Image (cartoon, grey):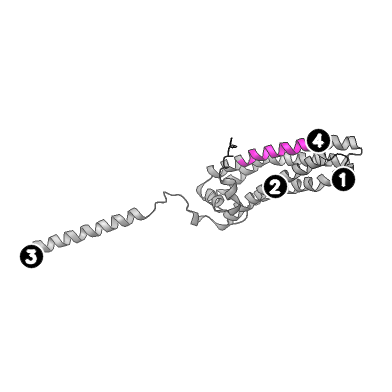
Amino acid sequence: MAQSRVIAIALSLSSALLLVACGDSDTPSTNGTTSPAATSDATVAWANAVCTASTQLQTSVQSAGEAIRSGASSAGTSPDSVKDQVKDSVAEVKDSAANLTRTVSGLPGGVEPQTAQAQEQLLTAGKQAQDSADQVSAAGDQVQAAKTAEEVTASVAALKTAADKAATDLTGYFDAVRGVITGSAEAVKYAFEAAPACRPLIAPASPTPSPSA
């Protein structure tokens, strides 16, 4: 009887140890990293605002490019009409660029401490895009200052060149943003991944289908 009781106790202990081991294996290991649930709402909100401002700048540059091409190709259009056609679009590029810089620079309270490093990298990445937007604004001022049809034509051509360069620089900026997100601390990376406005920016571009024969 005593021997049977010892065997029963041993079997019970073995079962308990097995259950504990299984329970431990089901528990995910954090390995010291920050989970999405631990990332502050303020960091997610800041990341979302940065991606929103970035997309708005891209949209404004594209709209300006379309308006400039339309103005440049409108034969017989009066100089004043051409000026009016590009004026609002150029102003939108300027405002969008200023808003992006303001948004990246303005860290709210409660963000993750590691966000400051990502902020610095984003400001560096955005400098060329900001400079290009400034060139679009300056070229737009030249269009508004033009007095003759010839001057308007020449200044619109220069504005188109500036807008094309801004579009190219924005492509590089978005590549840099994706690099900053990928290389950031886990808490910051999770914040960008959780921000709705950042999802299209983070997702790799879909390959363009080749035309069928």
* 2 vs 3, front mark: 2
Which segment did they paint magenta? 160-174
Tell me the element at label 1. helix
Secondary structure mostly taken by the magenta-highlighted segment of the chain: helix
Q: Earlier in the sequence, mark 4 or mark 3?
A: 3
Is 94 magenta? The answer is no
- Give the residue furthest to the right: 148
Seen at 33% across and 55% down, the residue is 24
Residue of label 1: 81
Residue of label 3: 1
* 4 vs 3, front mark: 4
Q: Nearer the viewer, residue 135 or 33?
A: 135
Cα separation, mark 4 vs mark 3, equals 102 Å
Q: Earlier in the sequence, mark 2 or mark 4?
A: 2
Cα separation, mark 4 vs mark 1, equals 16 Å
Q: Which mark is residue 157?
A: 4
- On the image, the x and y values in percent for residue 114 come to 55, 48
- On the image, the x and y values in percent for residue 42 come to 58, 56
Q: Quadrant of the N terminus?
A: bottom left
Is 170 magenta? The answer is yes
